[in-house]
Amino acid sequence: MSYPYQIKSFDEYKEAYQKSIEDPAAFWADIAQHFTWRKKWDTTLNWNFTEPKVEWFKGGKLNITENCLDRHIATKGNQPALLWEPNAPDEHNRTLTYSMLLEKVCQFAHVLKNNGVKKGDRVCIYMGMIPELAIAILACARIGAIHSVVFGGFSAQSISDRLQDAQAEFIVTCDGAYRGAKDIPLKNVIDDALIGNKTVKRVIVCTRTRIPVSMIKGRDVWWEEEMKLVEEAGITFIEAEEMDAEDPLFILYTSGSTGKPKGVVHTCGGYMIYTNYSFVNVFQYKEGQVHFCTADIGWITGHSYIVYGPLSAGAISLMFEGVPTWPNAGRFWDVIDKYKVNIFYTAPTAIRSLMGFGLEPLQGKNLSSLQILGTVGEPINEEAWHWYDENAGKKKCPIVDTWWQTENGGILISNLAGITPSKPSWATLPLPGLQMTLVDENGKEVFAEGDETVSGNLCIKAPWPSILRTTYGDHERCRLNYFATYPNMYFTGDGALRDKDGFYRITGRVDDVLNVSGHRIGTAEVENAINMHAGVVESAVVGYPHDIKGQGIYAYVIFNGKGINEALAKKDILQTVTRIIGAIAKPDKIQFVSGLPKTRSGKIMRRILRKIAEGEINNLGDTSTLLDPGVVEEIKNGKI
């Protein structure tokens, strides 16, 4: 499959970028014609950022699975679509060709329909990284159900909140999941999440770990038994549901600066076009290459660059169940060697973690198949960039440093591998269609004079096809979060630098959201969880630089009573956070304090707490206006 819209030179990039800015509708309409549509769209683009309202390819009829599967069968039916490497290296791996994947997706789509799932219904998917997860996602899309994947590390409370917000009536899960040396009891977590739930009608359970589970009559059914019924009926195909380009495809929950997670909604047409376009161009994908994205499908990276982007491009996508350091720190390199991986896309956190094991895990591993490296989730520091370049890429592989977010759907700023310039730790240039700008606190655009590098808050002046359309069930929250800060602009929540060449470097969140190991976690969410502990009076959470994770979580906690056993109280607090959110949100440091720095109106001065956590104790600014300036000295002296 050739990609007529694949950019082949820096000059072509500049030309495409110019066209995309001058006439976005014509630019994206030209790309969209290379996909399978049941009916062509009536209007390419309709938008305003005030309501906000964005519509791409409105009136166009399609089904994304026909573009990911059916259209490849004639030429790629026997080519691998998904390669699956299990958690344990000695366990049997699996290959699903495009024909096999289409058949499995159609059969599971029948299972969903047999269990009452209809177009527009919300299906919560809580599974480990097995091929059935991708099958479940595509089966939902096949029949027009809206999937909402929840990462397998989230707690019962987190799932319960998401089920309630989405008003989901169906769940697809596993008995358990493997993650390194751990067995995760997924079905048990779902059972806990469903206590008191009145909306869920059916739970479909896939067998993976054979951990004993409770199956509730009338509610719970086994994946394998349901699939057997469909197979015995001789069913191998189901017609794809016709969807409007603007119909919702999925909801994915992301942390915000308030405690409640928000459900980001992506739609069928624009999301498909943009994930494909960004995949083909950023990674410069060529027919037959093996693409290995190490993300979990529970995050947006897995949605876009394991499932929808690669499959819509007819690519070979490698899905990995395990972790990079088990059974040893050479696991990624073993997988690359085994499958002759050409494109390797991972997180700076993983790279920094592997750096800590030295070069021994790389010994004897043949990485010569690698052609392109990529990073995602957070800015990569220069030291990690050079280590990755020298030891994984042998200084022969371009590194794409990609910046984007759940709300964006696909990569927005990145060099195109081997085509546009790269610069260590800089995301560099926006993709065609992205009108990026930097603004100051008042929303005034910031421009450089001469060769200077400028900084500001990163905003976007016009929509691209995969921009979020709303936050599920609460459009006002979408407006307030992304479109109300600066009029007529989408605000990313990130700060950035821009150099004389127009390259961007992301400097991190400017709101109360942390970026821990590439995953966004709201400080309010963590504080709410800590405050649920019976002994906690109040808490404040900030980020601080962490050698492996990029950002660590530092919690300042006021505890009830005197003479507490700090070690025991810390364990209890960590357990509370794990139960309410999940282990991913556990604070790295907990400092017990008698008070927090507050203004006279009662606002916690997190700026001061952040500086103390970062070790900048002599640069706190004026603290005399605080309600109790003495608290700051106490916190400084007790810093961990």
Image: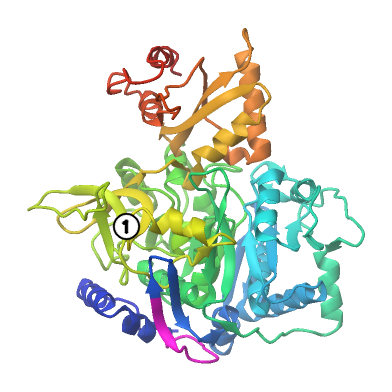
Magenta residue check for 252 = no
Q: Taking the image as drawn, is residue 49 in sight?
A: yes
Residue sticking out furthest to the front: 601
Please tell me how crowded label 1 is: few (under 14), some (14-19), or many (20+) other residues with Cα within 10 Å.
many
Measured as percent of width and height from the top left, residue 137 is found at 64, 68
Measured as percent of width and height from the top left, residue 16 is found at 26, 77
Q: Amino acid at mark 1?
A: Cys
In the image: residue 451, left or right of residue 247: left
Measured as percent of width and height from the top left, residue 316 is found at 52, 71
Image quadrant in which you'd find residue 132: bottom right
Residue sticking out furthest to the bottom: 39
Q: In the image, what residue occupies the spot 48% across and 44% down?
A: 257
For the residue pair 148 and 323, the one nearer the viewer reads as: 148
Check disc 1 and report the residue beneath it: 459
Q: Find numbered disc 1 in the image and state the secondary structure of the residue it sits on.
A: strand
Q: In the image, what residue occupies the spot 32% across and 65% down?
A: 417
Magenta residues span 33-46
Magenta residue check for 42 = yes
The prevailing secondary structure element of the residues shown in magenta is loop
Q: In the image, what residue occupies the spot 53% across and 55% down?
A: 295
For the residue pair 340 and 601, the one nearer the viewer reads as: 601
Residue sticking out furthest to the right: 217
For the residue pair 532 and 249, the one nearer the viewer reads as: 532
In the image: residue 478, left or right of residue 153: left
Q: Taking the image as drawn, is residue 293 in sight?
A: no
Q: In the image, what residue occupies the spot 89% across and 55% down?
A: 216
